[in-house]
Image (cartoon, grey):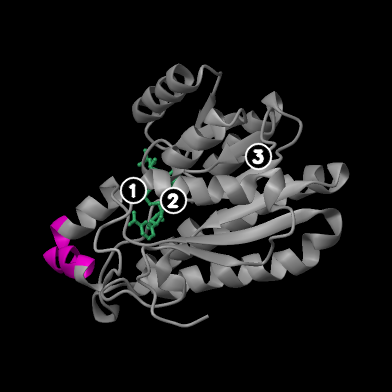
Amino acid sequence: MDLGLRNKVAFVAASSDGLGKAVAMELAKEGATVIINGRNKEKLEQTKKEIEHKCNTKVLAISGDLSNDNKRNSVLNTLFKHHNKVDILVTNTGGPPSGKFENLSMDDWDNTYKLLLASTVALVKAVIPGMKQQQFGRIIAITSQAVKQPVDNLILSNSVRASVAGLMKTLASELGEFNITVNNVMPGYTKTNRLLSLIESNPSFKSAIDEIPLKRFGNPEEFAAAVTFLASERASYITGTSLAVDGGWIKHIL
Ligand SMILES: NC(=O)c1ccc[n+]([C@@H]2O[C@H](COP(=O)([O-])OP(=O)(O)OC[C@H]3O[C@@H](n4cnc5c(N)ncnc54)[C@H](OP(=O)(O)O)[C@@H]3O)[C@@H](O)[C@H]2O)c1
């Protein structure tokens, strides 16, 4: 299947590692021009080299913390210095801290809002004018299975990610007439450094495998394949959806 991704410009937020990196790699393999991001410059540079080497392409790497207004603006300024539009936006950041309600402060809640919701709103705002002008766009949010079923000990994620899903669903209605699709992809337990550190801080995460019908954690490449399809020309009639890539973990029927 030709996904029609050749020469499409794709900004994958928070993509020096984990799910974002796998998505950037897959999009680059399909011929998209990829822009990657992360806070740690060294790690970002390594990932840039790895994608360039494996996909025989040029990658633009822009470091900066997307939860910080000034740093995010500087990332966007650099991006638009190199490209006058973005065809595909994949929103993502690291996850918020784990913990139960009584152990978390108001600062934890404020920071989670900035990390998950404000960063998504700002990135979407930046790409919409170009997408509208060219009457084409793909916006995909990386959220979590927590959108549909709360995960124990992750109250910050359980609460704030649902608002990102609400944002995506509403944007799908508002932007459809411009041929911009907006979707939400919900990773389940996937083997990345984030999952390893959650398991380290709370070994009960390991037993989550028993609750997954496929009886294993996912691989980042499996997640990336779903996002890449949604980013493609071939997903032209899919918008406003929330797609779980969770090995069947979520227990609701629809
Ligand atoms: N893996 C799972 O099982 C799973 C399941 C459900 C949901 N999720 C969610 O999916 C997202 C990605 O998870 P992951 O497993 O890929 O995490 P990860 O392995 O920790 O990778 C996170 C990536 O994002 C970058 N990053 C983190 N915070 C950032 C920020 N504020 N601004 C810019 N870049 C940032 C990191 O690089 P730097 O540290 O250098 O910035 C890294 O490249 C997270 O929100 C996570 O909570 C993951």
Residue 77 location (% of width, % of height): 65, 33
Q: Residues within 10 Å of mark 2 (few under 14, many from 20)?
A: many
The quadrant where residue 198 appears:
bottom left
In front of the other: 147 or 242: 242
Left or right of residue 144: residue 213 = left
Q: Which mark is residue 223?
A: 2
Res. 69 visible in picture: no
Residue 224 location (% of width, % of height): 47, 46
Callout 3: helix, strand or loop? loop
As drawn, 109 above or below 187: below
Q: Which residue is mark 1?
A: 219
The mark that comes first in sequence, 3 or 1, is 3
Q: Amino acid at mark 3?
A: Leu
Q: CA distance from mark 3 to mark 2?
A: 16 Å
Q: Amino acid at mark 1?
A: Asn
Q: CA distance from mark 2 to mark 1?
A: 7 Å
Q: Which residues are magenta?
A: 200-209
Q: Is mark 1 within 8 Å of ligand 1?
A: no
Res. 9 visible in picture: yes
